[in-house]
Amino acid sequence: MAYGVKIAKGKAYKGAALKRRHIRIRKRISGTAERPRLVVTRSNRGITAQVIDDLKGHTVASASTLDSSIRGGEGDKSAKAKQVGQLVAERAKAAGVESVVFDRGGNRYAGRIAALADAAREAGLKF
């Protein structure tokens, strides 16, 4: 089945391109109970990570820069992304998840996305 994203103009073009890339990635990636999907959503201000079992449609664990333990912390956005990666890995391991499929959400694997992934790996989550 083909999914289309309407071509936009100006600033909306970036959002449409991001959506197209995410659709292209999601054609190949799916989370199961044994190996759920670690989804990263990035905005200009913050970052969110969720561990999702796509077969059941449930979120197993999640973390965000809006969590109270991270929100008032020091450091730049990359440092906060590392904290989110550690937190989501701890919560996933507490829920019984050992390995995940990484879904970068159409973003480039660099900067905050890479910092989050590396921190989750260091905390013991396997990709």
Image: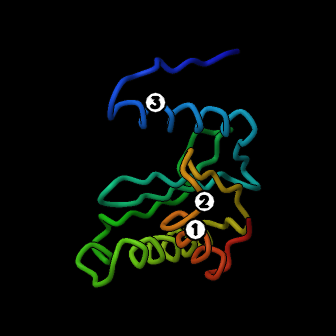
- Residue at 64 percent across and 41 percent down: it is 54
Q: Amino acid at mark 3?
A: Ala
Q: Amino acid at mark 2?
A: Tyr
Where residue 101 sits, quadrant-wise, is bottom right
From what the image shows, is residue 62 above or below residue 58? below
- Residue at 46 percent across and 20 percent down: it is 7
* Percent of width and height locating residue 13: 41, 31
> Label 3, label 1: how many angstroms apart (C-alpha)?
22 Å
Q: Secondary structure at mark 1?
A: helix
Q: N-terminal of the two: label 1 or label 2? A: 2
Q: Quick check: 62 left or right of 60?
A: left
Q: N-terminal of the two: label 3 or label 1? A: 3
- Residue at 56 percent across and 31 percent down: it is 20
Reading the image, the residue beneath label 1 is: 114
Reading the image, the residue beneath label 2 is: 109
Where residue 14 sits, quadrant-wise, is top left
> Mark 1 touching mark 2, by CB under 8 A?
yes
Q: Quick check: 66 left or right of 106?
A: left
Quick one: 69 or 7, which is closer to the camera? 7
Q: N-terminal of the two: label 2 or label 3? A: 3
Quick one: 87 or 116, which is closer to the camera? 116
Please identify the quadrant where the N terminus is shown: top right
> Mark 3 touching mark 1, by CB under 8 A?
no
Outermost residue toward the left in this view: 72
Q: Residues within 10 Å of mark 3 (few under 14, many from 20)?
A: some
Q: Which mark is residue 16?
A: 3
